[in-house]
Image (cartoon, rainbow, N blue to C red):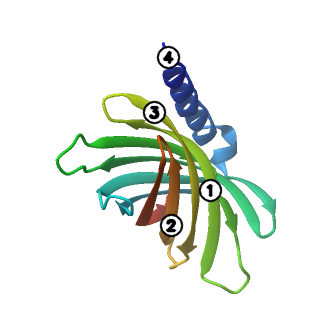
Amino acid sequence: MSAVKILGSSIVVICALLAFSPVTATAQVDLGAHAGINLDAGNPHLGVDVVITVAQLSPNVSLGVWPSYAHVFIEDGHDVELLGCDFPFEFKIDNSIITPFAAPGLGLAFYGDETLKLNLIGGMFLEAGGGVRPFADLAIRLINGTFVDLLFGVVFEL
């Protein structure tokens, strides 16, 4: 078994353990979807997201785990599947409906072969009320070079 497969399996197991740990019994769990476009090549993608708050680090900063899946549509090529496990730090701003976040993480890209990727994500949630949180982010993916994705989505509190 290759090192990438072992590491990728480890990422999936860690995300599953964090997502279904006793800590999450009281944590906020959001489920949703996103659409995006790769700014390097213009390839669109669609995906699903789960955002789980696992720790309140201070009154205005929380840490979560964000497992995600995306299907990237490659014109005249082989489509790519992306699995990610990011760790968003959310920064609450008093009296604001905007919650900025920074989310480093790891993931796997599948396109005939598996490749490990490092994710560097920054963006913001819009606290729309009623447990609805639209978001936008810029994701830098370090994988056989650097790829930049612009994403828009929405998650719903469960």
Residue 27 image position (x, y, % from top left) = 65, 53
Residue 81, quarter of the rendered image: top left
Q: Look at the numbered disc 3 and give the secondary structure of its residue.
A: strand
Which residue ends up furthest to the bottom in the rendered image?
95
The answer to which of marks 4 and 2 sits earlier in the sequence is 4
Taking the spot 32% from the left edge, 35% from the top edge, the residue there is 111
Q: CA distance from mark 3 to mark 2?
A: 22 Å
Instruction: Kindly identify the amino acid type of the residue bearing the numbered disc 4.
Output: Ser
User: Between disc 4 and disc 1, whose residue precedes?
Assistant: 4
Residue furthest front in the image: 145
Q: Amino acid at mark 1?
A: Ala
Coordinates of residue 87 in the picture (x, y in percent): 63, 50
Q: Which mark is residue 137?
A: 2
Mark 4 packing: few (<14 Cα in 10 Å), some, or many (20+)? few
Q: Return the residue at label 1.
A: 103
Near-viewer residue (151 or 133): 151
Q: Residue at 30%, 62% (x, y): give it.
A: 42
How far apart, in angstroms, are the residues tagged by discs 4 and 1?
Answer: 27 Å
Assign a secondary structure to mark 1.
Answer: strand
Q: CA distance from mark 3 to mark 4?
A: 11 Å
Farthest-out residue, left: 76
**Residue at image mark 4:** 2
Q: Is 85 situated left or right of 115 in this image?
A: right
Q: Earlier in the sequence, mark 3 or mark 1?
A: 1
